[in-house]
Image (spheres, rainbow, N blue to C red):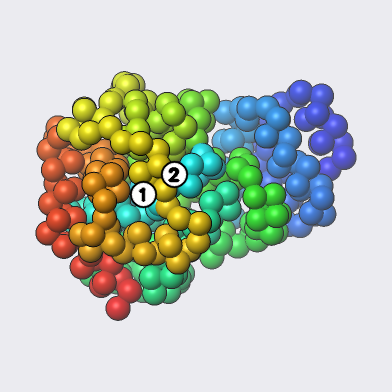
Amino acid sequence: MKKILTYLHQGKKLTRSEAKNILLDISAEKYNNEQVASFMTAYMMRDITYQELAGFRDAMLELCVKIDLDGRETLDIVGTGGDGKDTFNVSTCAAFVIAGAGISVTKHGSYGVSSSSGSSDVLLALGYEFKTDKSLLMKELDEAGITFFHAPLFHPAMKAVVPIRKALGLKTFFNMLGPLVNPAQPKYQLFGTFDLSVLSLYRDILRNDEKNFTAVYALDGYDEVSLTGAVRVVKPDSEELLHPSDFGLPKYRQSDLYGGSTVAEAKTIFYNILAGKGTAAQVDAVCANAGLAIQTRYAERSLADCVATAKESLESGKALKILEKLTE
């Protein structure tokens, strides 16, 4: 590792195969925690390259517990995290709204690292039990319209980095990898990224995957559609700048999206939104993201129509029923 660190600190870049092999060695616990932490922080000092991110992803997909959906077409909605905005669990909440709209969702997520509550934290608090048994996961998907892949269970080889990431408490390249390594590799995905350079990397990687995807970055720093300003939206064959008005929604303040400082607070906000007790800003942010995800699934539909579909799912109670079904 000393040789690798010296190489990186000289400003040199890894090839795709080198990056893959290093992450395979990290998963095999060939390096101590201090060395791994140093390796991770090297990418806080410079941008990661396409070849490096692709190589790290290759390693994680090779090592993960894969799930074959047996032909089911599903969608994932997930952000990189690491935007430092302390928002509530927008993407996870939107996942239930999407499922309530009749689109099957295979959600991938984990505990919060740079935030107080990740998707796994809030779902666990709401009573969901993590699992890897395919028959149980497919039963959830078929009966509730959504299932959840708790990343540590599906990426057990990465257990060596969990305490290091937690100790650092900062975004690392693992934040960039998380959304890209869903063990089911669903056909449709909406990604949120924490900066424009990551948005560009996602575009290049996903185009090579020939996926139906949408990737977003809000220009004021959010890894989701925040409605606090303009958002850059990238699809396989297009790129545009959208404003809150394009979603048919008003502009909000950043403080309107605060997610609390504890998992208990995040749980309350999450449940209240699905139960029809959320604030206008919370509801609209969830519906904007859910609407964009629905449009990712049905490209022929207008964004306004998709946002309206999301609102109907939420306001009718369908999204809440999905949560209740999943946690019963």
x, y percent for residue 109? 46, 55
Total number of numbered discs in the rendering: 2
**Furthest residue toward bottom:** 328
Do the numbered discs 1 and 2 sit on residues whose CB atoms are within 8 Å? yes
Q: Amino acid at mark 1?
A: Val
Quadrant occupied by the C terminus: bottom left
Q: CA distance from mark 1 to mark 2?
A: 9 Å
Asked if 80 appears above or below 270 in the picture, the reply is above
Residue 154 visible in the displayed image: no
Residue at x 54%, y 65% (from the top left corner): 153
286 or 86, nearer to the observer: 86
Q: Quadrant of the N terminus?
A: top right
Q: Name the residue at 71% across, 26% down.
A: 13
Say which of marks 1 and 2 sits in front.
1
Q: Residue at x 50, y 57 (%)?
A: 261
- If you read the primary sequence from the N terminus, does the residue marked by circle 1 or circle 2 appear first? 2
- Amino acid type for the residue under numbered disc 2: Gly
Residue 98 at x, y percent in the picture: 24, 52
Q: Secondary structure at mark 2?
A: strand
Left or right of residue 221, residue 311 in this image: left
Q: Is residue 310 left or right of residue 226?
A: left
In the image, is residue 196 above or below residue 149?
above
Q: Measured from the top left, where is residue 317 in percent x and y?
A: 16, 62
Circle 2 Cα neighbour tier, 10 Å, few/some/many (<14 / 14–19 / ≥20): many
Q: Quadrant of residue 54?
A: top right
Residue 294, label in figure: none
- Report the disc number at residue 79: 2
Residue 240 in percent (x, y) is at 31, 21
State the SS at label 1. Answer: helix
Name the residue carrying label 1: 90
Residue 252 visible in this rendered orientation of the protein? yes
